[in-house]
Amino acid sequence: MMSAELPPLYYLDNLRTLVRHVLGLYADILPDDMLGRSEDFLALPDAEAALLTRLLCRKGPLFRTDRLHYPEIGALEDALTGLREKGWIDRPGPPERDALLSLLTLPELRQRFDVPAAARTRSAVIRALSDLDARALLALSGLEVIALNTGDWLDWMRLAFFGNLYQDMTTFVTAQLGVQRYPGYRLRRATRLFNSATEMEAAMTLHRLREAVPDLPSPEALNAAVASLPPDTDHPLLQRRRRKALNTLARRAEQLGDPVLAERLYRESGLPPARERLVRLAFRDGRLEEAEALLEAIAAHPASETELAFRERFLPRLLKKRGQRAEPEWQPEAPETLCLTPHPDGVEAAVCHHLATRGITAFHVENRLFNVLFRAHFHDVLFADVQGALTHPFQMAPHDLRDPEFHARRQPQIEQAWQALSGPDWTAHLQRALSRPECAYLEDWLPEGPEVLALALSRIPAAHLALIFRRMLRDPHSNCSGLPDLILFPPVAGYTLLEVKGPGDRLQDNQWRWLRYFHQHGLPAGHVRVVWHT
C-alpha cells in the first residue's frame, strides 16, 4: 500500500479540485447562486480560501476566532477580514443559546460567568445561567464569534461531484495517503450524472427528505413530507432514490400507526423491501390470500436475491397459518465438528493450522478471493462508459449498479467477458486482467496475493468460476458477500470451499444461499463447526 506526505494546503487543493470538476461538468445547469459562489471561491486568495475551507470542514454553525490555529495559512486576521468583506463569513445575529454555550468548556463557563459553587456539572451551570439570553451571554463571555455565510453551497458541490452526500472531503485524503485505492476508468462530460438543474434540485430534495423522515412527529407532518416528494422521473438514479424515500416514508407511516398510507407508499415504490413489507402488513391483517399472491409475484419476478430469500423464509409461516404444510427447504449436510486449540488469530486460523497438519494448504479468503477475480474479469462491465454511471474518480462501483437496467446497458461487454472465460487461454486472460493498472486497487483486497491466485487459477475449473461469477453478476449488491471463509488446496489437485463456524455461531442467510447454490451445481463446498479443546 502506498504512503504519501500531504502538502500543507492539501485541503484547499482538494476543494478547488472538486469545485473545478463540478464547474467543468455542470456550469451550464448549476443554479445561478451556486455557480456564482463557486466562481467566487476559485477567485479567493490562498489564505482566505484555505481558512474558508477549514471552517467549512469543521462543525459549526458558530466558531470562536481564538480557537482558529492554522500556522500554514499565515495571518489569520487578514484572512478573516477578507472573508468578511467578501460575504463568506459574518458576525452572527442573536445566536441560539445552546449553540453559543456549546462553544464554552465547563471550566470556561465557571471562569467567565458568576456561577454558584454548588453548580458542579455542566447541566447545573447552564441552569444557573438560564436568566441570561444569548445576547447577554455573548457579551459577558468576551468571545469573538463568527458564522459561515455559505448556506448549503458545499452540499451542492459534494452532491454534484460525488452524486451523493455520504462521501466528503476525507475521500480525497484517504486516496492521497494510499489508505484507499480506487479502480481506473474513463470520465467524460458527455456521460455526466445530471442534465438539468431540476434533476440536481430533486436529488438534493430527496436527500434532505430521507434525513428528516425519522424525526417526523405526526401523521400530519408525514403527509406534508409525502406531498413534498419530487415527481417521478425516468432518471435511473433519481428514480431509485425516490423509491427509497417512499420506503422510508412508508416505514415511518407504520411507526406512526397509519398502515393504509404505508401500503399506498410501498405499492408506489416497489423497490425492495416494499413487497416484503406489504406481505407482512397483509399477513398481520389476516389477508392471507393477498400475502400469498404477493409471495408468488416475488417468486415469478424477484427484484433481488434478498427479496427471493425473504419469500423462501416467509412462505412456510404463511402456509402454516392456512393449515398447510410447506415442502422442507434444502439443508446442508451436518457439519463435521473439529475440536481445536484456540488460535490467537481466530477460528479460521485455527482450522487452517489444523488442515496444514494434514498436508492441506488453506487460505482464509472469505469474500475477497472471488471478488478480486470477479472484479478483474468484469472490470470493463462494471466500469463501462455508460450514461450517468461514472462521474468522479472515487467510485468502487457505478452509480447504476442496483438498477434493473444495469445488465441491459452493458450487454456487449458482458457477452465479451463470458467469451473470454470460455476460451482456451482463460487463465492468461485473467492474469492479464489482474495486472492491468486499472485493477491495481485489488492488490489491497487480497494480502495473500500471488500464491493464492496462482493456486486458484490452476485448480478451479473455468466452468466452476463461471458458475460463481454468474451468481455474483446476477445481483452484485447481494451476491458478492456470504462466500465461504476458506479455500482448501489438497496436495495434488482440486480445491474445496469451506465455511467455518465457531462456538455459538450459525450460518447466515447469504452463506446458506451460497452453500445451496454450490450443492445444486456440484461445486465442492461444505462447512465445519469448531469447538475449543479445554
Image (cartoon, rainbow, N blue to C red):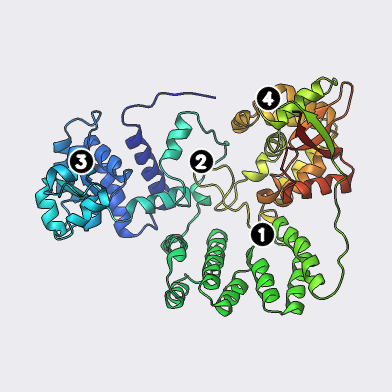
For numbered disc 4, what is the local secondary structure? Answer: loop
- Residue identifier under label 3: 107
Circle 1 packing at 10 Å, graded few (<14), some (14-19), many (20+), is some
Dot 2: what SS? loop
Which numbered disc, 2 or 1, marks the residue that appears first in the sequence? 2
- Please tell me whether mark 4 or mark 3 is closer to you in this view: 3
Circles 4 and 2: CB atoms closer than 8 Å: no
Q: Position of residue 426 (x, y in %)?
A: 80, 32
Mark 2 and mark 1 residues within 8 Å of each other at the beta carbon:
no
First reached walking from the N terminus: tag 1 or tag 4:
1
In the picture, measured across the screen, residue 173 lies left or right of residue 71, that is right
Along the horizontal axis of the image, is 79 left or right of 269?
A: left
Task: Answer few, some or many: residues within 10 Å of disc 4's Cα (few below 14, many 20 plus, some between 14 and 19).
Answer: few
> Which residue is depicted at the point 25% across and 28% down?
72
Spot occupied by residue 174 in the image (x, y as percentages of width and height): 46, 34
Left or right, residue 53 beside residue 168: left
Label 1 vs label 3, nearer the camera: 3
Label 2 CA crowd tier, 10 Å (few <14, some 14–19, many 20+): some
Give the Cα distance between marks 4 and 3: 54 Å
| Residue matched to label 2 | 394
Residue at numbered disc 1: 404
Q: Which residue is mark 4?
A: 449
Q: Amino acid at mark 2?
A: Phe
Q: 79 or 35, which is in the foreground?
A: 79
288 versus 123 height, above or below:
below
Gap in Å between the C-alphas at discs 1 and 4?
34 Å
Marks 1 and 3, Cα distance to the nearest angstrom? 58 Å
Query: Which quarter of the figure is the N terminus placed in?
Result: top right
Question: In the image, what residue occupies the spot 35% across and 60% down?
Answer: 31
Q: Earlier in the sequence, mark 4 or mark 3?
A: 3
Q: Which residue is drawn at the image coordinates 71% and 39% (left, top)?
A: 374
Q: Secondary structure at mark 3?
A: helix
